[in-house]
Image (cartoon, grey):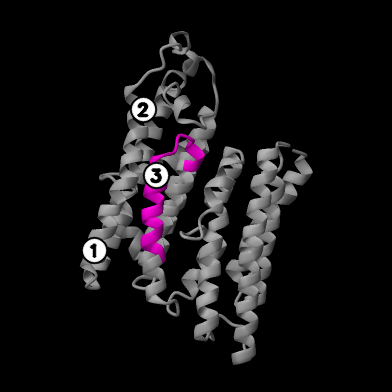
Amino acid sequence: MNPLALTISLSSLAVGTTVTLSSYHWMLAWIGLEINTLAIIPLMTKTPHPRAIEAATKYFLTQAAASALILFSCLINAWQTGEWNFISLTDLPMGTLSIALMMKLGLAPLHFWMPEVLQGISLSTGLILSTWQKIAPMSLLLQISHLVNLDLTIALGLTSILIGGWGGIGQTQLRKIMAFSSIGHLGWIVIVLKFSPLLSFFNFLLYFIMTAAMFMSLTVTSTTKMSQISASWSKNPALSAITMLIMLSLAGLPPLTGFAPKLMITLELVKQNATLLAAVIMLISLLALFFYLRLAYIITLTLSPNTPNSLLIWRTTPKSHSPTAIMSTLALILLPLTPTILLI
């Protein structure tokens, strides 16, 4: 991709998110979301392949529909209240606005675009789509969390956790698995949104770190399919071991970072007398745990029979992977710092 075009696209992504984060006016927030949507499309189509064009088209149509719904909701609200700020929202625009933001995030049952789009783009663009592109709509959702319908958040959160686990079981493509993993994690974030927005923000922060670390590890090893992941051990044993631990962290196993949000969300739901809901989402999460454990098993306990001569490649190819190392470290050992982070 042309360096100038790449710089403009990445700068536009930063500007779009910044505009949305710093806005107090719904029109400004909508403009920021639109800049974000349009900026990532050149990155999706940087590889001239029909699959990438298809993914970009699906993404554009879905995001355009969600943006139109957001604009329509804001116009109706301004017509009813005479104000454009985030605080003055009536019931009807609030419902449609919440659904539109959740559609932008990829929550089930509005998730159908997410696995298909992620599968059609490169791992580096998939990293941006799964992490950075979620910041702007999630920030808006957190700002209006006190007005969101509780039944809506619980219904979509439960559905997302179920779809995220069930959909990932039958996949062999790692990008689709990461898409369903993203849907499941967003379900955990949204289900506690009404009870504790701070906890939702904390969960989103850890989701951002763990997903970024996972995509970086897959990018370094150039792994996109489950059949390739078993051969990554002979290419780079250290990174393969770290990738396995990141998968277990995404699954939420202690003492890794991913255990913290699941534990705290469960405790918060029990404190809010939603013990049955906490039990149900923990049981549903076993579906996601299955495919994470299957990936961990493949990457560590199986070796490809035709790669014995490449055992020394990882020692003889000097490469700097500092960002991957930093994100991987955060994705694995943040659990002891959890009380400090919440106090801040």
Question: Would you name the residue on which mark 3 appears?
Answer: 331
Q: Is residue 287 left or right of residue 19?
A: left
Residue 321 appears in view: no
- Mark in front: 2 vs 1: 2
Residue at horizontal 57%, vertical 38%?
A: 123
Q: CA distance from mark 3 to mark 1?
A: 22 Å
Quarter occupied by residue 297: top left
Q: In front here: 169 or 265? A: 169
Name the secondary structure under disc 2.
Answer: helix
Residue 176 appears in view: yes
Question: Would you name the residue on which mark 2 appears?
Answer: 298
Amino acid tagged 2: Ile
Quarter occupied by residue 341: bottom left
Find out whether residue 166 is within the magenta segment: yes
Residue at horizontal 35%, vertical 70%?
A: 196
Specify the quadrant that holds the C terminus.
Answer: bottom left
Q: Which mark is residue 267?
A: 1
Amino acid tagged 3: Ala
Amino acid tagged 1: Leu
Magenta-drawn segment: 156-176
Within 10 angstroms of label 1, few (less than 14), some, or many (20 or more) residues?
A: some
Q: Count the marks: how many?
A: 3
Residue 2: percent from left, percent from top: 78, 39
Residue at horizontal 44%, vertical 21%?
A: 231
